[in-house]
Amino acid sequence: MEAEGLLAPLSLSAKFEGSFAYLTVRDRLPTILTKVIDTLHRNKDNFFKEYGEEGTQAEKTAISFLSKLRNELQTDKPVLALIDNAEDTEAWNEYMQRQQDLMEDGNPVSWFKSPWLYVECYMYRKIQEALYMNPPMDKFDVFKEGKTQSYFESQQAIKSLCTYLQELITNMENMTAIQLRDNFLKLLQVSLWGNKCDLSISAGQDNSQKSSPIDSLPDLQRFILVDDSSIVWSTLAAAQGSGSSGMKHTRVDIVLDNAGFELVTDLVLADFLVSAGLAKQIRFHGKSIPWFVSDVTKQDFEWTIMQTMAANHKWMSASGVQWKHFVKEGTWSYHDHSFWTLPHEFCDMAVDAADLYSTLQGSDMILFKGDLNYRKLTGDRKWEHTVPFDQALRGFQPAPLCSLRTLKADVQVGLQPGQAEKLSSQDPDWMTNGKYAVVQFSNPHREQ
Ligand code: F6P
Ligand code: MG
């Protein structure tokens, strides 16, 4: 009886015709593959200049690999095992077997029949396979141009945010506890709305931040469907005094999402946390391969800091210099782990990436940025909207955690009874149009 209550609902999948997963697999994923092919094609001369005939050949082979992949996707062919012998190849193939075991009637795992989360992640990993299999292109980031462009197109917003940050830091000493809290909540919201700016939902179209991020906050408040930010604040504030000597070495982990404006909002929040003495250490977690068009890699992280440092704007460059210093002295550190680019739900982490899970257990607060992280937190399943967030995590509770996410996929838990129905009647696309957001918190130590 209890097993029935605990059973997780079905995974979202393109097999549900007309669903957002179906439309994504049918329309958006092939568009993204076409853009990747175009990017390789446009860089043909550069590959030749850099690597000669070998570069040209690699580009051609990678393009035909990706065209074949697009065709397989569009005609719902079986998903194939990876053959590139990378660090994560075995894990991917083992996961494919798990998916195979879940298929009804022994049908092969395929694009329109298997879980959406799995096949969408698989597409990005296959793009990487096309490059791995064709050195010297194995280090090429097919999404770099778009990420760079989105950073430059958000310049105005970045300038105003960095100016705001530097003013706060200058006045930090005179700030009352209430002002400190209010400013924390503002920057948390800026980081939340920074997640509007991803390039995957728009299939690579410009999605940058144009207006002043701080000024927009009051108008956006009513679009936050669940707002646990004051619990995030009190948990962080409580962590300060919980060490044996009264002061604790508070550590915040930020599981990053997109490069461009969103990353800047995360760095600004991280700077505030350290400058205000709310955290002694920030660990950023990013992707080890290009992922979901705009996700942050180590290269993007370093590039963004360098670029901000080099900006011809006093407060932007002052921010960049400070960030570089944080990295140099180890207050900030960047980490990648292959688990972040595997297709697993996060409830699998304790078993499938035990090292990462135990690292996260050392955190005082983990901030999960963005939609894909939310999908993985909740398993990308057809949950009832009123199911508590803790329940949808299915045991994934390494430390106090908070999801900062704008809604771009049709999974949402933790709502009040009637809230989803009301939203559906007012705005039928509320789960996928990126207008709404949640700040959702869970604490493994919370008293029940
Ligand atoms: O469906 C939109 C989408 O491509 C989802 O697949 C994915 O969850 C999301 O965009 C990426 O958004 P984010 O960058 O916020 O994780
Ligand atoms: Mg993303």
Image: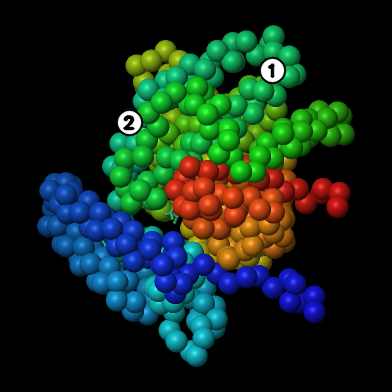
Local crowd size for mark 1, using a 10 Å CA cut-off: few (<14), some (14–19), many (≥20): few
The amino acid type of the residue labelled 2 equals Glu
Answer yes or no: disc 2 within 8 Å of ligand 1. no
Q: Residue 139: image x %, image y %?
A: 32, 52
Give the number of the disc on residue 133: none
Task: Please report the residue visible at 18 percent of the width from the left and 49 percent of the height from the top.
Answer: 43
Q: Secondary structure at mark 2?
A: helix
Task: Please report the residue visible at 87 percent of the width from the left and 29 percent of the height from the top.
Answer: 245
Q: Is residue 400 left or right of residue 292?
A: right
Circle 2 residue = 153
Q: Residue 125: image x %, image y %?
A: 40, 62
Task: Please report the residue visible at 34 percent of the width from the left and 77 percent of the height from the top.
Answer: 76
Q: Image quadrant of residue 346?
A: bottom right
The amino acid type of the residue labelled 1 equals Gln
Query: Which of these two is toward me, 325 or 254?
Result: 254
Residue 102 higher or lower than 419, as above or below: below
Question: What is the spatial separation of the Cα atoms under label 2 and label 1, in whole angstroms?
Answer: 31 Å
The answer to whether any part of residue 9 appears in the image is yes
Query: Which of these two is toward me, 262 or 316?
Result: 262
Residue 266 higher or lower than 106, as above or below: above
Q: Residue furthest bottom?
A: 105
| Quadrant of the rendering where the N terminus is positioned | bottom right
Q: Residue 23: image x %, image y %?
A: 38, 63
Give the number of the disc on residue 179: 1
Task: Please report the residue visible at 45 percent of the width from the left and 19 percent of the height from the top.
Answer: 160
Residue 274 higher or lower than 289, as above or below: above
